[in-house]
Image: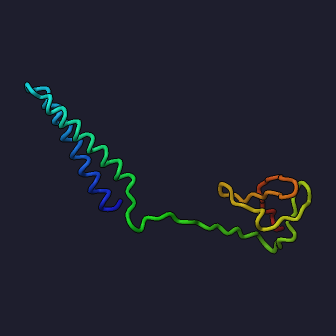
Amino acid sequence: MKAGKIILFVIAGFSLIFSFLFFLASGGQTGGFNLIFIAAGLAGVGFVLIFFATRLQEPGDSTQNVTVNIDLPGQVGMDTIKCQSCGGVLSEKDIKLVAGAPMVSCPYCGTSYQLSEEPKW
């Protein structure tokens, strides 16, 4: 967590604590109606600060793109991979990584299945 977020959360925490204290103090006095407005204002400020602290992006925070390369096992050439259903030749763009497993989608018949490695013996 960056320093800006920490500062906003600390100020919001103090604002909410003092809001609670002002709300408690409003019940013990005559004319405590003004203290209720102060408590509501401090609570509003605290919640707004929490909202902005959670949405704040510090410089240098950016999304990262992850590229996954699928290494085919053994001496497999791309011209030897054929669809299990229709026998159509599959290319590299027909293989996608879904939930950590290589999935093949045939452009000819529309069949999708998981690419599995056969034993090498």
Q: Is residue 16 above or below residue 104?
A: above
Is 59 situated above or below 12?
Answer: below
Task: Name the quadrant containing residue 58.
Answer: bottom left
Question: In screen coordinates, is 56 left or right of 106?
Answer: left
The residue at 20%/36% (across/down) is 39
Whole-percent x and y of residue 57? 40, 60
Residue at left offset 16%, top offset 35%:
22
Q: Residue furthest right?
A: 87
> Which quarter of the image is occupied by the C terminus?
bottom right
Q: Give coordinates of residue 35: x percent, y percent.
A: 14, 33
Residue pushed farthest left? 30
Residue 107 placement, left or right of 46: right
- Number of numbered discs present? 0
Side of 58 relative to 85 (left or right): left
Q: Residue at x 26, y 44 (%)?
A: 45
> What colour scheme was applied to this rendering of the protein?
rainbow
Q: In screen coordinates, is 77 left or right of 49?
A: right
Q: Nearer the viewer, residue 63 or 102?
A: 63
Q: Quadrant of the N terminus?
A: bottom left
What percent of the width, then of the height, locates residue 97? Answer: 69, 60
Residue located at (8% from left, 25% from top) = 30
Where residue 6 appears, x then y in whole percent?
Answer: 29, 56
Q: Nearer the viewer, residue 103 or 14?
A: 14
